[in-house]
Image (cartoon, rainbow, N blue to C red):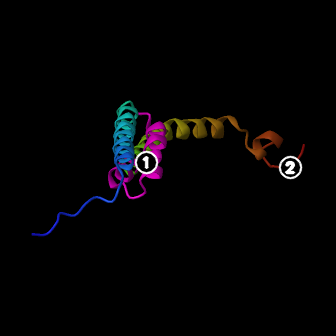
Amino acid sequence: MTEPLRDSRTPASLSDDADRAARIEELLVSGLDHYFAAEYEQAINIWTRVVFLERDHDRARAYIERARSAIAERQRESEEAAAPRRRRLQVRRRRRRPRFADARGRSGRPQ
């Protein structure tokens, strides 16, 4: 009968791994709290810490991408909402601005 494979890590490193996994999970949940409160930048900062702890953490990377998409969507919506107002301001400015010919007389020549 073959002997089962033993884990070469020490009990202390197993505890460190468990602490690390718990810390990662805590950060993920904290980031989600910020995400659902529409605090996308803060959520990204927290999930980036997870990526620093574990470079290949796919879930953290996916959350970061989702938050970046939410920021881009919010920016797009903001620009769309501001566009009609911006156009109205441009029209008002054009109406107020005297034309060069009107300021100097109809012919455009100084009088």
Question: Counting residues from the N terminus, which is met first, the one under dot 1 or under dot 2?
Answer: 1
Tag 2's secondary structure? loop
Observer-nearest residue: 73 or 35? 35
In the rendered structure, does residue 67 fall within the stretch colored magenta? Answer: no
Q: How many marks?
A: 2
Amino acid type of the residue that numbered disc 2 sits on in the rendered structure: Arg
Find the magenta span and give its range.
38-64
- Residue 81 showing in the rendered view: no
Name the residue at 48% across, 38% down: 84
Which amino acid type is shown beneath numbered disc 1?
Answer: Arg
Location of the C terminus by quadrant is top right
- Camera sees residue 108: yes
Q: Residues within 10 Å of mark 2 (few under 14, many from 20)?
A: few
Residue at left 41%, top 48%?
64
Q: Position of residue 60 (x, y in %)?
A: 37, 49
- The residue wearing badge 1 is 68
**Does the magenta run of residues contain 55?**
yes
Residue 32 position in % (x across, y down): 35, 37
Horizontally, residue 28 falls left or right of residue 86, namely: left
At a point 38% along the width and 43% down the height, the residue shown is 24
Q: Residues within 10 Å of mark 1 (few under 14, many from 20)?
A: some
Instruction: In the displayed orientation, state which residue is furthest to the bottom.
Output: 1
Q: Quadrant of the N terminus?
A: bottom left
- Check the image and name the residue furthest to the right: 111
Magenta region, main secondary structure: helix
SS label for mark 1: helix
Could you say where residue 69 lies in the image, as x and y percent from the top left?
Answer: 40, 49
Residue 71 locus on image (x, y percent): 44, 43
Mark pair 1, 2: CA separation: 57 Å
**Disc 2 target residue:** 109
